[in-house]
Image (cartoon, coloured by chain):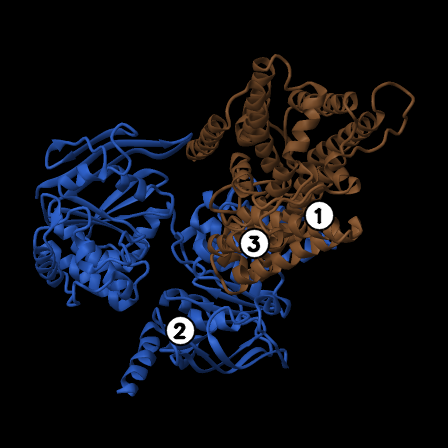
Amino acid sequence: MQTILEMKNITKNFGGVKALNNVNFKVTAGEIHALVGENGAGKSTLMNILSGVLPYGTYSGDIFYKGKHCVFRSIRDSEKNGIVIIHQELALVPYLSIGENIFLGNERAKRGVIDWEKTYSEATKILRMVGLHDNPHMLIKDLGVGKQQLVEIAKALAKDVQLLILDEPTAALNEEDADNLLRLLLELKKNGITSILISHKLHEVIKVADSITILRDGATIETLQVEHGGINEDRIIKGMVGRELVDRFPKRQPRIGDVYFEVKNWNVYDPLIEGRKVIKDVSLKVHKGEIVGISGLMGSGRTEFAMSIFGKAYGRNISGQVFKDGRELQLDTVQQAINNGLAYVTEDRKTAGLIGIEDIKHNISLSSLNKISKRGIIDDDLENAAATTYREKLNIKSSSIFQKVQNLSGGNQQKVVLAKWIFAAPDVLILDEPTRGIDVGAKYEIYNIINQLAEEGKAIIFISSELPEILGICDRIYVMNEGRIVGELMKEEASQESIMKCIMQSNRGRY
Amino acid sequence: MENGKMKPAAKVTSIGYTIRTNMRQYAMLIALIVIMIFFQIATDGVLLVPMNVTNLILQNSYVLILAIGMTLCILTGGNIDLSVGSVAAFTAAIVGTLVINKKMDVTLALTIGLLIGAVIGSWQGFWIAYVRIPPFIATLAGMLIFRGLTNTILKGLTLSPFPRSFQKISSGYIPDIFPNLTNLNMTPIVIAAVSSLLLLYVQIRNRKRKFENSREIMPRSLFVAQLIIVILAINLFALALAAHKGLPIILVILGVLIFVYHFFTTKTVPGRYIYALGGNEKAAILSGIDTKKVLFFVYLNMSVLSAIAGIAFAARTNSAFPLMGNGFEMDAIAACFIGGASSTGGIGTVIGAIIGALVMGVLNNGMSIMGIGSDWQMTIKGFVLLMAVAFDVYSKTKSK
């Protein structure tokens, strides 16, 4: 087996912080090599160095690609050598067509004039390679995320990629699209393309990777060969966190009270598309001290349901009733929802949960300003005290409460969002993907916080795409599909299979 | 945690650190001082003679008033208000017609002027906040509409002169409280002395509280130096006013506005909402903030301040004319950006905008004294704006 890439003694500093410390990384030609590690372990930094995003000279160490010493000063340099990186945030232009995007920056042109005939005929060919059969004239904005991800790969293929780097390619995909993508990676491998896969989803890593390199705190810990056997998720996690996580989900003795929160016959229409019903006749109840999961694929309407309840923050023509403690609630605005003791932790903390340019303190107090102010005037001392309390209580790792939240890691950002809502002292908490994109250690801490809240008698609705998490945390699980509740399972009877079965059966029922 | 009960000790930061982290704030202030020293030398000391100091304030009062309101607009998300010049002119035209042609009582006319500002503000706020017309477009429309209406009201002519009581807004002075004590006007000196003491008290108390609450505090030497400089500046400024004609009425109005809006933006709940809206609108909405109301209020407020600026300008020029207020919006916007406001919203301060406006004002005034033509003045101001923002961008990328 021939080594295609070797990164030797890579060290990189950001300001005073060592992001990478003497990292060594070796990839064999024609393999799928997974790169795993907690957030902040240095995976993305390493790949940014390899692809020239961080140019030669800003780091120390050497890169050898196909035996040659490389000096990449920009992405163009690395792409010339057939190294293409696909970032987590897709880099497609929504209002250009698939074909135009595939050849963006790499146009099929003669003397600056684009040959559209050639563009689209080649685009069609490449699209077929990635298993996409849509018209290349379609605009990117009309495609789902799964297909957009495939277009990104097509774009890489158009550049004659030999080493493909994928940064969290399945983070935003549902299981079906994710499987599709992984299959494509195996397909590409057969065609001799080497891939580096960065992923938090360890079951996917195990499914496709030939070798796995683990980074921790900016250093290489080990490289595991999957063919040698004995590789499972626990083994990888051990390498990632440096200790054995005996239990990924903290234990809790549920003390479940009476029915506390109830939604009856909830219907919601799409705010943009006339007449399209997004939520269909959903009814559910949550007891005091209970964690109720809502499971379902992406696009099943979970987020839309949660947001429509939370003061009609989504949708129109909303009908149905919401009860808390037997009393019907009037929830027309977010303010009303908050005043009635509801809290909604959004699935997307960056774009909808936090104000990145503000500090921890201002973020935590934002939805509870009435608590720290008198006649509209904010009491600085009360605000500082509240922020300090929650920073300690939730163990938010930061230099002080005056640190801007955009400079925190994902896990700590999520803790700030949680702190903000805990400070609002709600009775009913709706948590939408509260652990998305954060590392194992921080996840564990967040589960603990959620358990603690349930312990205090709050009613919790827990929305997640990760089945193991739903199964590990929730007392009862509703399964949602296409805007309907299609199953309700107690913890004891719930399993990945039983949840998937509910979804499949409801799909079958439609035809 | 073994020391969970113990309070962490207050941290006294190093001088270098304090300056580095507050560089942006200090930078424009230092730039202002450098520019003032430069013109003081270049104009052979004319810039800071008592009469010119007073003039500087009178000349720039309208920009300062507008910059306050514009800061709020920009804070909501880099939105600007292009209509401020037209609204100022429109208000001045109406007030002028009422006072000069209809011989209306000045106080009543002023009240009507402010009400007109509020009505125009509601009109623009409605389109921007509730119909969601981008502010740039809604206020561009407002700029045309109210400029047109100004012309209609004035029939293309200049209205003049205003009665003496009206002119006083921009050219009157607070009477001397100890008229026969010295040949200086004592009012500004007394006020400066009182505010110096007040400042001293508040600053020392704040520092103590910060220390008790184990917050970061700057080193003592820097703290004392800063206090001395500020108090010295206040008192020298007061002395200059005292040596001329005393405390201008418009400066009192300005002082009150600056204080109120500084307090509003830094200490109140609605003020915080404005920053939240500009920082992340979605997050603000999901935190229970009625962002439409906030946006509506901000534009309502801007038009009221435009009305005040219009009245102040009319009082100063002693006339209302069709072209008055042309380009006011650009001065105000430039002041905000020079003062450190972010073009994407959520970052910026009233004090910053005031400093920005003063930078522009001193440039105007200094260059005029030097006899530089208005063509070159504009070019130079353009460069200053560009450099200030470039510095801002540079220092931000460096701190990352």
Q: Residue at x 47, y 68 (%)?
A: A462
- Tell if the residue under mark 2 belongs to the same chain as the one under mark 3: no
Q: CA distance from mark 1 to mark 3?
A: 41 Å
Q: Say which mark, if any, is on residue A379.
A: 1
Q: Say which mark, if any, is on residue A250.
A: none
| Mark 1 vs 2: CB contact within 8 A | no
Q: Position of residue B229 (x, y in %)?
A: 68, 21
Q: Judge whether residue A233 can be spotted in this image.
A: yes
- To which residue does mark 3 refer? B146
Q: Is residue B63 above or below residue B42?
A: below
Q: Is residue A216 left or right of residue B197?
A: left
Q: Judge whether residue B289 can be spotted in this image.
A: no
- To which residue does mark 2 refer? A301
Q: Residue at x 41, y 66 (%)?
A: A464
Q: Secondary structure at mark 3?
A: helix
Q: Residue at x 11, y 62 (%)?
A: A124
Q: Residue at x 71, y 27 (%)?
A: B54
Q: Position of residue A176 (x, y in %)?
A: 25, 68
Looking at the rendering, in which quadrant would you find the C terminus of chain A? bottom left
> What is the total number of numbered labels drawn onto the structure image?
3
Q: Nearer the viewer, mark 2 or mark 3?
A: 3
